[in-house]
Amino acid sequence: MNSIPSFNSYIENSIIKNWNLDALTDYKGTTLQYHDIARKIEKLHILFENSDVKKGDKIAVCGRNSSQWAVAFLAIITYGAIVVPIQNEFKPEQIHNIVNHSESKLLFVGDVVATEITPEEMPSLEGIIYLPDNSLVISRSEKLTYARENLNAMFGHRYPKYFRPEHVKYHVDDPEELAMINYTSGTTGFSKGVMLPYRALWGNLDYLIDSVKPHIGKNCNILSTLPMAHMYGLMTEFLFNIVLGNHIFFLTRLPSPTLISEALSEIKPDILYAVPLVVDKIVRKEVFPHIQTNRARLLMNMPVINKRIKEKVREFVLRKFGERPCEVVVGGAPLNKEIENFFISVGFPIAMGYGTTETAPLITFAHQDNYVAGSCGVAVKHMEVKVLSDDPENVAGPVPEAERGHRPGGGVQLRGPGGHDVHLHGRCENHVRHGRLLRKYRRGAVGPGGSHDRRHRVGHILLVFRHTVLEVALADRRHHRRRHRHERLGGRCTLRVGESHLRHGVFPGGGLSSGLGVHEGHRARVRDGQPPSGQHRLHRHSGHLRVGAVVFARRAGRPEVHVHCHAGHRTVVR
């Protein structure tokens, strides 16, 4: 493989090339062009320089999606500092822990987060900056205070006549240099920081340029619905499209299906990235009521005319997703089987991706032209996926005994750009490589891929739960006190687990697992150690997870917690 170019050079070249084009828009708000971004980035660089922020220092960003969030991120990474994006949905104590654990020097906060955090809980911070206008919420440094108060004068002194494209010069990064620390959702307590080098970001960007760019138009519209503090949305919706010179729209508030549908009809994005839950709700609310009638079913099954009817249905569904997306890319969880089969039957342009934070984020991907139901695609460029099996096309990878000792092992191994293991930089665990990280990637038996070489979802995260216990935590305390009803199940049952991590989405497979998923407002947590009373370890049986899983289900709009036990009983908490 040729040498890896500077990641920041892509951002620099895009800003210069697209200087007078629209870049970032807050939905129903203001718009920034690429030259506006460059000017704001330069001012923040001056602020950093005069506040004694060195290259390699950590700077955290926590707030809802917005153009100012995007500018802050770009300013940090192009300065040479290490960006620490924090999900704004995190509780204050989680935000405090991440800021302290990452040893961040500055913190950018949005309007909501600014009112919730307690600065005294983050003693190492030198300052907190308000994202909407870059004003100081708190300053513990005289240099920072002086630099902010005199920022415009400093900018004018550096560029007395004008600020033009030739002035845009950004940090030249090294592939192994640390670019960002992305904190996961913390299923085992407080979040762990995933340390991502520039080569990980470049590997994903290079693949997207080769694979996705040819499918979309030049200077097209993009609707950002995913949280930018999550690698899926950060890479696919933001960084990739900034590099292409596209126009990105941010919703700036909770992306409900209703709001997304409204924005789609106005913005008409050329490609849409989404999670299955949003796609599922749009289809069930906006599409199925119109086509799941007796007349529609009859016409779709009639010979000769059914092809034309399905084309009309496809056009109708496309209008619900903005009319002109070349693809609707789904990731983050498995797509509901009913929705997936419907899309395939009408020829809807659906694409599927699978990945993790540690791979920044892509591992596999499938465009609509090579999409296979139940699959999350083939290994992307720069990513090697190895199935530890003598017959990987037909037999799932084994679970080795080494996993019991938390040593490397499992059904799948990954290797990233340049032949490096994807976990080379490890997790930010007291700034040393965390030995147990290897379990993250030696996980799961990849299902038989056949001649298509698809990496099937079934079994992808098998090892994650091999020696752990699932603990159900209901976010809504009203459901804590519910009566229990025990049911006797006939025979043994299996649960096919996909890539959902038991946090969101709908599980594939049949039997008891059919239609099971995490209900909104609830979460499932994974903890190491012995199982609490009334809960059971997961086991592997005939290539699938046997009874013993704790999952959520939705039936008739009411949340239920299903606990599948070894004895063949099911406890339903209503």
Image: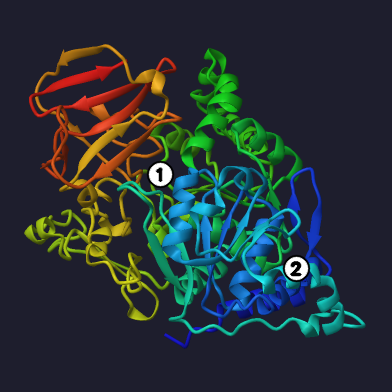
Q: Residue 178: x, y in percent? A: 46, 75
Depth check: give the residue in front, 77 or 25: 77
Measure the C-alpha gap from mark 1 to mark 2. 43 Å
For the N terminus, the image quarter is bottom left
User: Which quadrant holds residue 510?
Assistant: top left
The disc labelled 1 sits on which kind of residue? Ala
Residue at which label 1 appears: 333
Contact, CB < 8 Å: mark 1 with mark 2? no
Depth check: give the residue in front, 76 or 342: 76
For disc 2, the neighbor class at 10 Å (few under 14, some 14 to 19, many from 20) is many
Q: Is residue 361 visible?
A: no
**Which residue sits furthest right?**
161
Left-right relation of 431 to 73: left
Q: Measuring 62% from the left and 52% from the top, which residue is drawn there? A: 271
The disc labelled 2 sits on which kind of residue? Arg
For disc 1, the neighbor class at 10 Å (few under 14, some 14 to 19, many from 20) is many
Depth check: give the residue in front, 208 or 164: 164
Q: How is the image coloured?
A: rainbow
For the C terminus, the image quarter is top left
Q: Relative to 309, is 140 above or below?
A: below
Q: Residue 564: x, y in percent? A: 18, 27
Left-right relation of 134 to 141: right
Q: Residue 302: x, y in percent? A: 51, 23
User: Which quadrant holds residue 517?
Assistant: top left
* SS category of the residue bearing label 1: loop
Q: Measuring 31% from the left and 72% from the top, which residue is drawn there? A: 432
Eye-nearest disc, 1 or 2: 2
- Mark 1 vs mark 2: which is more N-terminal? 2
Left-right relation of 100 to 516: right
Residue at which label 2 appears: 148
